[in-house]
Image (cartoon, helix red, strand yellow):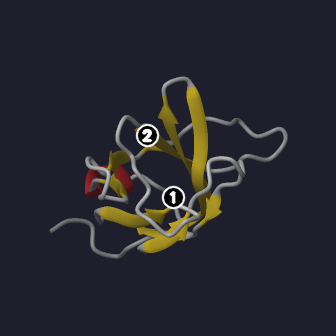
Amino acid sequence: MDASFTFDPNSGVAQAVNQVISTGASFVANYSVTTIGGTAFNFTGYSGAASLTKSVSIGSSLYALRSFNVSLGTTGSDPNLTLGLSAANTIGLKEGRYKYDVLVNSGTTVYRIVEGDVMVRAGVTSSV
């Protein structure tokens, strides 16, 4: 699911966006990010990382099951943040609810920019 949202680094609050991943299929999510002033968020000088896990509850084994490919806008006027998983990376996921988040950093400052639930749905067809 694609989404547009405003990000305020000073708020310390991530945007909540839920996603759906189909096993055995490629997954891409595009986010268009703006500042509280309504202009394109400038990702120049930022890097990003994103992970998927089954649970973040107390007592769970908190580790990333998958790491997303993360792409950030390369110019000051490109507010796009893109997440991706290849079909090979989704095929081994079990059906159910997962959690994900996206971290971006500029220098030593790290922000959680997006987080949410992911519903993984099993497919019927095993290969193309």
Image position, residue 114 (x, y; %) = 57, 56
| Badge 2 element | strand
Compared across the picture, whether 49 is left or right of 15 comes to left
Image position, residue 29 (x, y; %) = 38, 65
Image position, residue 52 (x, y; %) = 53, 48
- In the rendered structure, find residue 28 and report the number of the disc placed on it: none
Compared across the picture, whether 103 is left or right of 41 comes to right
Dot 1 and dot 2 residues touching (CB under 8 Å): no
**Few, some or many residues within 10 Å of mark 2 (<14, 14–19, 20+):** many
Image position, residue 70 (x, y; %) = 36, 46
Q: Residue at x 68, y 47 (%)?
A: 10
| Badge 1 element | loop
Q: In terms of depth relative to the viewer, which is nearer, 17 or 106? A: 106
Q: Amino acid at mark 1?
A: Lys
Residue 5 visible from this viewpoint: yes
Furthest residue to the top?
108
Q: Residue at x 29, y 66 (%)?
A: 25
Q: CA distance from mark 1 to mark 2?
A: 26 Å
Residue 120 visible from this viewpoint: no
Dividing the picture into quarters, in which one does residue 115 lie? bottom right
Quarter placement of the C terminus? bottom left
- Label 1, on which residue? 94
Q: Residue at x 31, y 51 (%)?
A: 73
Q: Which marked residue is nearer to the observer: mark 1 or mark 2? A: 2
Quarter placement of the N terminus? bottom left
Q: How many marks?
A: 2
- Label 2, on which residue? 48
Dividing the picture into quarters, in which one does residue 27 lie? bottom left
Q: Amino acid at mark 2?
A: Gly
